[in-house]
Amino acid sequence: MSWKDTAEPLLVRMPAVQRPDGHVPFKRKLTWTGGVLLLYFFLTNVKLFGLDIDASQQVFGRFSSILASGQGSIMQLGIGPIVTASIVLQLLGGADLLGLNTQDDPRDQILYQGLQKLLVLVMICLTGLPMVFAGGFLPADTAVASSLGIGTTGVQWLIFGQMFVGGVLILFMDEVISKWGVGSGIGLFIVAGVSQRLIGGILTTPFIGNNEGIIYTWYLFITGERGTGPVLAADGLQTVLLQGELLGLFTTVLIFAVVVYAESVRVEIPLSNARVKGARGRFPVKLIYASVLPMILVRALQANIQFLGRILNAQLGSMPSFLGTYANGQPTGGLFYFLAPVQSRGDWMWWLEGTAQPVWQILTRVGIDLFVMIVGGGIFAVFWVETTDMGPEATAKQIHNSGMQIPGFRQNVGVIEKVLERYIPQVTVIGGALVGLLAVMANMLGTIGGVSGTGLLLTVSITYKLYEEIAEEQLMEMHPMMRQMFG
C-alpha cells in the first residue's frame, strides 16, 4: 500500500472553496477580489489580543512586505506558511518523491491540493509556536493574564490561537480569489503591503518607521531646516542622494522601467489551427517566463534561516561565534551574518556608515547574497515552471488539445514539445537569474519607503500581469466566443 492510499481519506476531506459551476462575470470577479482585499486590510489592523505591543519585536523585518505580514496583528504570519509549504512540495516534487501525476490524473491533483493545505497547517504551527513561546518575539501582556486569570502561558496559547486562525483565513482568502476573483490572492496581498509602504515613503512617515517621507524630507532640505542654508550649499550632493532619498527614487523608477521592459521581451512561436483555416496565433515565451513569484521562495527560505538564527540566539543566550554573534537582534558575525541578505545601503557602504565589520566580511556577504539570489532564482524558476504546468511537455499538450499546431511541423505533441524545449528551459533560467540580480541591486541602492528590492519587483510584475489578465477578461466578456476558443 502506497502513502497515497494511506493518506487519501484525510487529504480528500481537507476543506476547500467550491469552484464556480460556470463562467463568473467580470464584475462579480472584481467584487470578490475587492472584498477579499478589504478584508485583508482590515485583518492587518486587528491586533492580537493579549500581546504586549510595546515589548514585541519585529519578526520578519524587511521581509514583512514580501510575506504580506502585519506585525502584531492577526495576519502576523502572512503568506509565510503557504510559501514555505510550496518550497517543501517543490523540492519533493522536483526529486520525484511524491509520485503524483498532477497533469493528467484528477485523483492525484486532489491529493496534491490536500497535501499542500495539510503542509500549510503544519507550517503555521512550526512558524507560530516559536514566535510566541521560544524567541520572546511576541510576549504576553501580564495585565491581560492577571485580568483573565489564566496565567502567562494561557495568554500565549490565546495569541497563538489567533495567529493560527489568521493563517487559515489567508489560505482560504487566497483560494477565493484564485477561483472566484482576478489574479492570485498571494500576489494581491504582496502588492497591497508594498504599495502601502511606497505611498508612505512618498507622503508621510507611519509605514516606514523612523524614516521621513520623501516629500517632507525635501521640504526640510529646501527650507534649510536640515542645515544652515540651502541643501546643495549646506549638505552637499551626498546628503541629497542618500538622506534626501534621490537615489531611492531613481532606483524605484529604474526597477519599474526594467521590469515592464523585461515583461515585453519575448520569443513568439507562431501557431495555426488545423481545423479552422486562417485562424492563427502566437505563443509568447517571455524573458521572465516563470514570473517574479519564485523570488518569494528564495527570500522566504532566507527569512526562515534568519528566524532560526534569532531563535537559537534567544534560547542559547550566546551561540558559538562561528555560527553567529548578535547585537540588537541582528547578526553581526558568523555564519548567520554571511547568510543574511543585504537589505539596505548601510549593509555594504562601509565608507559612509562606518560599520564595525571588516571590509572583507561585508564583501563576502554581498557576494553570497548575489550567488544565492542568482543561482536560487534560476533553480526555483525551473521548479516553478515544472510544478505549475508551464514546462515544454505540459505546454505542448495544452497547445495540441486546443487544436493548434506550429506551421511547417506535423500536428504532434512530441514535435511541439521539441520546439518549445529550444526556448523555455533556457529562458526560464536566464529570467530567474536576472530577477535575482535585480532584487539584490535594488536592495543595495535602496528604494522609496524602505521597500525591499524583491518586494518592488514582485509588485511591478504582479501588477503588470494583473493588467494583462483584466484586459483578457474584458475581451472575453465582450466576445463570448473567445472563451470557448481559449477554454
Image (cartoon, helix red, strand yellow):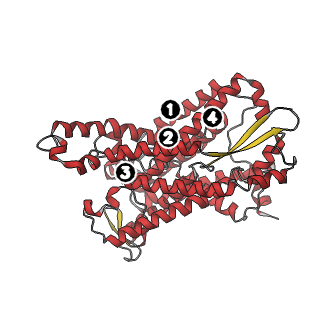
Would residue 102 be visible to someone looking at this image?
A: no
Q: Earlier in the sequence, mark 4 or mark 1?
A: 1
Q: Which residue has dot 4 on it?
A: 469
Q: Which of marks 3 and 4 is nearer the N terminus?
A: 3
The residue positioned 69% from the left and 48% from the top of the image is: 14
Q: Which of marks 3 and 2 is nearer the N terminus?
A: 2
Query: Separation of disc 2 and disc 1 at Cα?
Result: 13 Å
Q: Crowding near pointer 3: few (<14 within 10 Å), some, many (20+)? A: many
Give the amino acid at mark 1.
Leu
Circle 3 — which element?
loop
Q: Quadrant of residue 223?
A: top left
* Cα distance between the residues tagged 3 and 4: 30 Å
132 vs 407, nearest the viewer: 407
Residue 63 visible to an observer of this rendering: yes
Task: For label 2, count other residues whose C-alpha is less than 10 Å away and answer few (under 14), some (14-19) or many (20+).
Answer: many
Q: How would you rate the neighbour count of disc 4 (Cα within 10 Å): few for under 14, some for 14-19, many for 20 or more?
A: some
Disc sitting over residue 38 in the figure:
1
Whole-number angstrom distance, CA of label 3 to CA of label 2 = 18 Å
Q: Write the residue at 41% across / 54% down.
A: 443
Q: Is mark 4 on a helix, strand or loop?
A: helix
Instruction: Specify the amino acid type for callout 2.
Output: Val
